[in-house]
Image: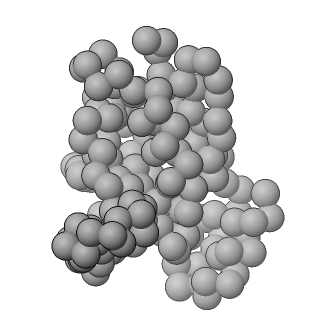
Amino acid sequence: MAFRYMVLKNGWLIFNYGTGIANFRASTGRPGISDPSIENMGPIPPGWYIIYPSEIEEGSVNFLEKKDDVVDYMTTYSHYVLRNIRGDWGYYRVKLHPQKLMYPNRDGHRSEFYLHGGKTIGSAGCIDVGREDIALFKLIKSTSTYDGTDNILVEVTEYPNGNGWNKLSATSPVEELEQWWNSF
């Protein structure tokens, strides 16, 4: 198994999975907020985190394939709906376990960060890959051995979001955020 790691820098999540590299547009926190100590709005604190692929939680990706089994279909779909009632989680998510923070006294003692997808741009501090979560998590799963040696190191740099993120408003209309997102 090759060493796998991710780097979140300038609005991109770069995944080196040993035999290749994949780039995914990503953001963290709310638009216009750059202070990682602001709970539920600021970006994830810079530092190093670990992902355990065995902890990946799945949403509704497979419910379209399970229509033959009505019980399975309804269970999977209801799980997806319930999971997204309290936030924009996308189809997949996985917890980010902090290992070492760059500025341990500046993080506001925040925790419970995830890597996930979603319909809208921005998060409460997690790493959000938007609608690219299906492709990213498929790649994570296909390169995992699930034997405990396939954990993924995630580095969050001091500048995790793309240029202009700090100038956007946290209350910007979705169209403005999507236009900014697609300008790269």
Residue 156 x %, y %: 48, 38
- Residue 29 vertical position relative to residue 23 in the rendered view, above or below: below
- Residue 25 vertical position relative to residue 146 in the rendered view, above or below: below
- Identify the residue at the far front of this view: 68
In the figure, is residue 77 to the left or right of 90? left
Residue 63 x %, y %: 36, 67
Residue 123 x %, y %: 43, 66
Q: Looking at the rendering, which quadrant does residue 176 occupy?
A: bottom right
Residue at 64% in and 35% down: 22
Q: Quadrant of the C terminus?
A: bottom right
In front of the other: 49 or 42 = 49
Residue 144 x %, y %: 39, 26
Q: Looking at the rendering, which quadrant does residue 175 occupy?
A: bottom right
Q: Is residue 60 visible?
A: no
- Identify the residue at the far right of this view: 183
Count of all numbered marks drawn on residues in the image: 0
- Residue 1 vertical position relative to residue 140 in the rendered view, above or below: above
Q: Quadrant of the N terminus?
A: top left
Residue at 61% in and 83% down: 174
Residue at 56% in and 63% down: 131
In the figure, is residue 138 to the left or right of 84? right
